[in-house]
Amino acid sequence: MKALTALLGLALLSNAGGALAATRTVTLTVPTMDCATCPVTIRVALLKVPGVSQAKVSYERREARVVFDDAKTDVAALTRATDSAGYPSFLADKQ
Ligand SMILES: [Cu+2]
């Protein structure tokens, strides 16, 4: 029982270390969205970036919330992706 608990503890620790350290969520401001289909284009562009696991884009707030693996990509790659899709973006003040 003790060994099992120790093993479980180890598994949890290593999992947390791997997953939590690398996952990052940022909010990008995308000011030039001008209709309800813009978010779809932006979302597709963001999800194509290797390392991005989630992208939620709000037309109302002109914002993209992106979850990505810190070890595989960075904010510069995300803004570059929206840029090439026709939507310049930058890191929002509130994170
Ligand atoms: Cu549009």
Image (cartoon, rainbow, N blue to C red):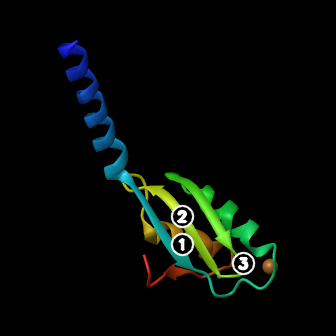
Residue 66 is labelled as: 2
Instruction: Specify whether 60 is left or right of 47.
Output: right
Q: Which residue is mark 3?
A: 59
Instruction: Tell me what residue is drawn at x 42 percent, y 64 percent.
Output: 74
Label 3 is placed on what type of residue?
Tyr
- Marks 1/2: CA distance? 14 Å
Q: Position of residue 60 (x, y in %)?
A: 71, 81
Q: Nearer the viewer, residue 22 or 83?
A: 22
Q: Of discs 1 and 3, which sits in the foreground?
A: 3
**Image quadrant in which you'd find residue 10:** top left
Find numbered disc 2 in the image and state the secondary structure of the residue it sits on. strand
Separation (CA) of disc 2 from disc 3: 14 Å
Q: Is mark 2 within 8 Å of ligand 1?
A: no
- Looking at the rendered structure, the secondary structure element under dot 3 is loop
Does 84 appear above or below 29? Answer: above
What x and y, as percent, mark residue 41?
74, 68
**Is 20 left, or right, of 41 in this rendering?**
left
- Looking at the rendered structure, the kind of residue marked 1 is Arg
Give the residue drawn at x 26%, y 36%.
13
State whether label 3 is within 8 Å of ligand 1.
yes
Residue depth check, mark 1 versus mark 2: number of the one nearer the observer? 2
Of callouts 1 and 2, the N-terminal one: 2
Crowd tier of the residue under label 1, counting other residues whose Cα lies within 10 Å: few below 14, some 14–19, many 20 or above: some
User: Which amino acid type is shown beneath numbered disc 2?
Assistant: Val
